């Protein structure tokens, strides 16, 4: 009954530490991490946790024989290659949970993975202070489901397991729409704050608000053309609400820029640009931001 977590970063570490309070967990990465790991809670208390950290590439068929669920917690751009490192040695049809932002890898892995594939969309917030220290920045909520609404009992079982571990979760049959709504919010906030190196709240300033509104208009137009339901309060209402609620945040793409890591611009912007092409919609802002981050990553 082992839960395998691939990608021992901020969210993988948080999930691993929480789940390990209840059942065996293997936290698999591409390099060794120190143990114990420290976890600082949203209330500010820090605890130490022994973790079974392993190199993914060194896990044997025997190590993997008791795995009942694989949680994939790399960034979107690393998801498929990280999974490939253990895939052939895992028990056939092991359930897979994808935690990535965006909607780039989810449809491909749902199609290609032989076992049930669920997607998780979470508003938990975490970051790594160091290789030995994770900060759980804020409690959130996690929704779990299959892109086509299948595997309801597995989704419920996993949501219950996560909730018991202290990460409030709910099984849903509309994860596809929820991932789209999160992607739409991320598309309106992340590229702008990462490009101009600002906290989320500054998007309301006269210099940045018109850019944000232009992206919101492009995203809403694409979603409408493709028949993807917009949030009940409208996309603009949702995005500006999130900006207000997270005004002091350095968004994930900004954190990646500041620490010199690759950004998830493809995972967030490519699904929109692809859909826009399919439906003949104009996307000057989204395309310009995607070009900017693609050039940036090409030149290192
Ligand atoms: N952090 C958060 O608050 C939230 C994150 N998410 C999403 O969750 C996903 C993970 O985010 P986050 O935890 O912040 O990211 P991190 O960058 O902190 O963690 C990613 C981890 O994946 C590891 N990794 C990369 N390649 C491989 C590989 N081939 N094999 C094994 N491990 C590998 C990295 O190792 P290394 O250190 O060696 O690079 C790192 O430990 C992202 O898609 C993000 O958008 C969603 C909501 C909130
Ligand atoms: C909602 C937002 C933009 C909050 O910072 C986020 O999800 C992120 O940082 O990626």
Image (spheres, rainbow, N blue to C red):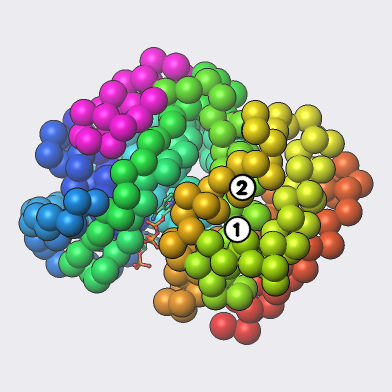
Across and down, in percent, residue 62 comes to: 20, 42
Measuring from the top left, give residue 21's x and y in whole percent.
12, 39
The mark found on residue 67 in the picture is none
The residue shown at (44%, 61%) is: 249
The residue carrying mark 1 has its beta carbon less than 8 Å from ligand 2: yes
Q: Residues within 10 Å of mark 1 (few under 14, many from 20)?
A: many
Q: For the C terminus, which image quadrant?
A: bottom right
Q: Does residue 47 appear in this view?
A: yes
Distance from the alpha carbon under mark 1 to that under mark 2: 8 Å
Left or right? Give the position of 243 relative to 94: right
Assign a secondary structure to mark 2. helix
Q: Which mark is residue 189?
A: 1
Left or right? Give the position of 20 relative to 274: left
Q: Residue furthest right?
A: 280
Q: Which residue is mark 2?
A: 239
Quarter of the image with the N terminus in it: top left
Which residue appears at 79% of the width and 51% of the height? Answer: 218
Q: In the image, what residue occupies the spot 32% across and 21% down?
A: 157
Q: Is residue 218 left or right of residue 164?
A: right
Q: Does the segment drawn in magenta span residue 161? A: yes
**Residue 43 locus on image (x, y percent):** 19, 51
Assess disc 2: are there few (<14), some (14-19) or many (≥20) residues with their C-alpha within 10 Å of its C-alpha.
many
Q: Residue furthest top?
A: 153
In the image, the segment drawn in magenta is: 151-170
Residue 237 placed where, x, y %? 65, 41
- Location of residue 175 with respect to 262 vertically, above or below: above
Q: Main secondary structure of the magenta part?
A: helix
Labels 1 and 2: the sequence-earlier one: 1
Labels 1 & 2 near each other (Cβ < 8 A): yes
Q: At 61% from the left edge and 41% from the top edge, which residue is drawn?
A: 238
Q: Secondary structure at mark 1?
A: helix
Q: Front-most of 226 and 24?
A: 226
């Amino acid at each position: 009954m082992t839960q395998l977590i691939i990608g021992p970063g901020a969210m993988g570490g948080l999930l691993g530490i929480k789940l390990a309070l209840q059942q065996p967990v293997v936290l698999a990465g591409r390099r060794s991490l120190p143990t114990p790991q420290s976890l600082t809670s949203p209330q500010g208390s820090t605890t130490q946790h022994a973790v079974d950290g392993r190199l993914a590439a060194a896990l044997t068929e025997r190590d993997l024989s008791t795995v009942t669920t694989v949680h994939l917690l790399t960034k979107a751009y690393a998801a498929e290659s990280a999974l490939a490192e253990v895939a052939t040695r895992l028990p056939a049809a092991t359930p897979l949970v994808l935690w990535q932002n965006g909607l780039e890898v989810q449809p491909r892995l749902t199609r290609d993975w032989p076992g049930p594939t669920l997607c998780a969309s979470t508003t938990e917030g975490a970051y790594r202070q160091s290789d030995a220290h994770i900060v759980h920045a804020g409690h959130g909520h996690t929704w779990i489901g299959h892109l086509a609404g299948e595997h309801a009992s597995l989704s419920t079982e996993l949501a219950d397991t996560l909730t018991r571990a202290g990460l409030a979760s709910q099984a849903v049959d509309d994860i596809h729409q929820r991932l789209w709504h999160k992607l739409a919010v991320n598309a309106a906030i992340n590229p702008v704050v990462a490009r101009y190196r600002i906290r989320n709240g500054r998007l309301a300033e006269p210099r940045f608000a018109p850019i944000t509104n232009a992206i919101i208009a492009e995203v809403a137009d694409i979603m409408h053309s493709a028949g993807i339901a917009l949030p009940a309060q409208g996309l603009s209402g949702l995005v500006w609400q999130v900006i207000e609620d997270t005004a002091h945040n350095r968004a994930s793409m900004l954190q990646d820029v500041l620490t010199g890591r690759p950004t998830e611009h493809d995972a967030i912007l490519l699904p929109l640009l692809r859909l826009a092409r399919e439906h003949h919609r104009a996307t000057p802002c989204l395309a310009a931001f995607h070009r900017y981050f693609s050039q940036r990553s090409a030149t290192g």
